[in-house]
Image (tube, rainbow, N blue to C red):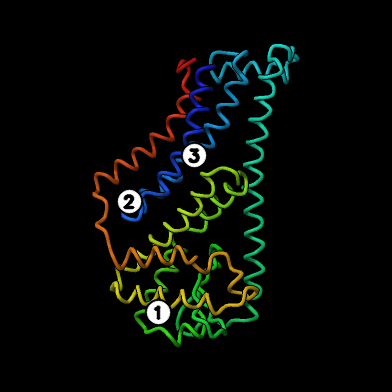
């Protein structure tokens, strides 16, 4: 397992810095947003698995030639009373680091979910006071605010789309339809789960380039995916106008307002600019065979650390 640990460590380093930096600078993800989304998820999962696996395998080197043997030997030390001297200080430290990192990631994932759920409950309570149900649109609330505002508030069966009076007055029926299709896509495709996972990843490892770049890229990709769904039902000029008008509403919101505080509500200027640029100067979609290769590469990337850890005899 000595060489397995070093190979996993090398893979973790590659996935922590050069790979996400190169991918974040690439232009093709906007042409294949789904494939790019799968690849970002694979990089994050494979990177985390490689980091933990490298420390785990190195720590178990004195106890066996593969993960199963090593864990069996570790169980003998923890539960069977075998001597800890078998491990040695460095290997015991590596095992402790693997356990602490695993616990840190799981705890941060739970803590991020708790914080998001609490924020959503508070936001929903405020909406109940400051908005009213739409007369002709189910699961839609109308906020009494002059700025053009539209966003979705996930919550399973209680998910709602929030529109402002200013938006309803400003947009044409087709432009409003484009906005609704965009926001409903976020809800139906459960984009909030992706945002939660990558927000937790960034909170757990804020110093890691992968975590910051992945969160930014995923936030942009889900907007592109929602735009593509809207384009199936409305024409491109309508969607462009709707995006520009909704984005203009963010400049009219005070920093402490209800909608300004909603983390899932307003695109950043960079994301809005990228969305409009993609629609105004469209590039052809990535060929289907290349998208398939990206997805296959993402699955292979995730399979490499998994196989190194679980298949006995590989680089023992």
In screen coordinates, is 5 left or right of 290?
right
In this figure, which residue is indicated by the disc labeled 3? 17
Task: Please name the residue shown 58% across and 13% down the image.
Answer: 64
Q: Residue 28's mark?
A: 2
Please tell me which residue lies in front, 303 or 246: 246
Give the quarter of the image for residue 184.
bottom left
Which of pointers 3 and 1 lies earlier in the amino acid sequence?
Answer: 3
Q: Residues within 10 Å of mark 2 (few under 14, many from 20)?
A: some
User: Which x, y percent locates residue 254?
Assistant: 61, 77
Compared with 43, 145 (above or below) is below
Q: Residue 53's mark?
A: none
Q: How crowded is mark 1: few (under 14 residues within 10 Å), some or many (20 or more)?
A: many
Kindly report the distance in space between the C-alpha atoms of the residues bearing marks 3 and 2.
Answer: 19 Å
Q: How crowded is mark 3: few (under 14 residues within 10 Å), some or many (20 or more)?
A: some
Give the quarter of the image for residue 246.
bottom left
In this rendering, the label closer to the viewer, 3 or 2: 3
Compared with 109, 66 (above or below) is above
User: Which x, y percent locates residue 217?
Assistant: 45, 53
User: Which x, y percent locates residue 188?
Assistant: 44, 62
User: Mark 2: which secondary structure?
Assistant: helix
Task: Please name the residue shown 30% across and 73% down the image.
Answer: 234
Q: Residue 176's mark?
A: 1
Kindly report the distance in space between the C-alpha atoms of the residues bearing marks 3 and 1.
Answer: 41 Å
User: Mark 3: which secondary structure?
Assistant: loop
In screen coordinates, is 125 left or right of 147?
right
User: Which x, y percent locates residue 49?
Assistant: 53, 34
Which of pointers 1 and 2 lies earlier in the amino acid sequence?
Answer: 2
User: Mark 1: which secondary structure?
Assistant: helix
Which of pointers 3 and 2 lies earlier in the amino acid sequence?
Answer: 3
In screen coordinates, is 73 left or right of 149?
right
Compared with 255, 110 (above or below) is above
Name, please, the residue furthest toward the bottom: 169
């Amino acid at each position: 397992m000595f060489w397995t640990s070093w190979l996993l460590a090398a893979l973790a380093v590659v996935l922590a810095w050069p790979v996400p930096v190169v991918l974040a600078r690439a232009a093709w993800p906007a042409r294949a947003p789904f494939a790019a989304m799968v690849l970002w998820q694979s990089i994050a999962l494979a990177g985390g698995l490689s980091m933990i696996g490298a420390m785990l395998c190195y720590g178990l080197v004195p106890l066996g030639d593969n993960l199963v043997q090593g864990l069996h030997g570790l169980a003998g030390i923890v539960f069977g009373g075998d001597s800890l001297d078998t491990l040695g200080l460095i290997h015991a430290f590596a095992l402790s680091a693997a356990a602490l990192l695993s616990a840190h990631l799981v705890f941060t994932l739970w803590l991020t979910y708790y914080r998001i759920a609490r924020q959503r409950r508070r936001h929903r309570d405020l909406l109940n006071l400051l908005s009213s149900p739409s007369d002709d649109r189910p699961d839609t609330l109308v906020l009494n605010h002059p700025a053009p505002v539209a966003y979705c508030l996930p919550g399973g069966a209680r998910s709602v789309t929030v529109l402002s009076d200013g938006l309803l007055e400003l947009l044409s029926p087709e432009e409003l339809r484009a906005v609704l299709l965009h926001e409903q896509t976020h809800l139906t495709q459960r984009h909030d789960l992706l945002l939660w996972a990558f927000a937790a990843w960034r909170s757990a490892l804020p110093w890691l380039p992968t975590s910051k770049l992945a969160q930014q890229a995923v936030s942009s990709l889900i907007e592109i995916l929602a735009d593509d769904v809207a384009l199936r039902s409305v024409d491109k000029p309508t969607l462009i106008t709707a995006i520009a008008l909704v984005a203009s509403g963010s400049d009219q919101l005070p920093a402490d307002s209800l909608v300004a505080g909603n983390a899932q509500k307003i695109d950043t200027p960079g994301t809005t600019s990228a969305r409009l640029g993609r629609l105004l100067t469209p590039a052809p979609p990535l060929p289907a065979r290349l998208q398939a290769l990206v997805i296959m590469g993402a699955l292979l990337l995730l399979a490499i650390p998994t196989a190194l850890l679980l298949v006995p005899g590989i680089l023992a």
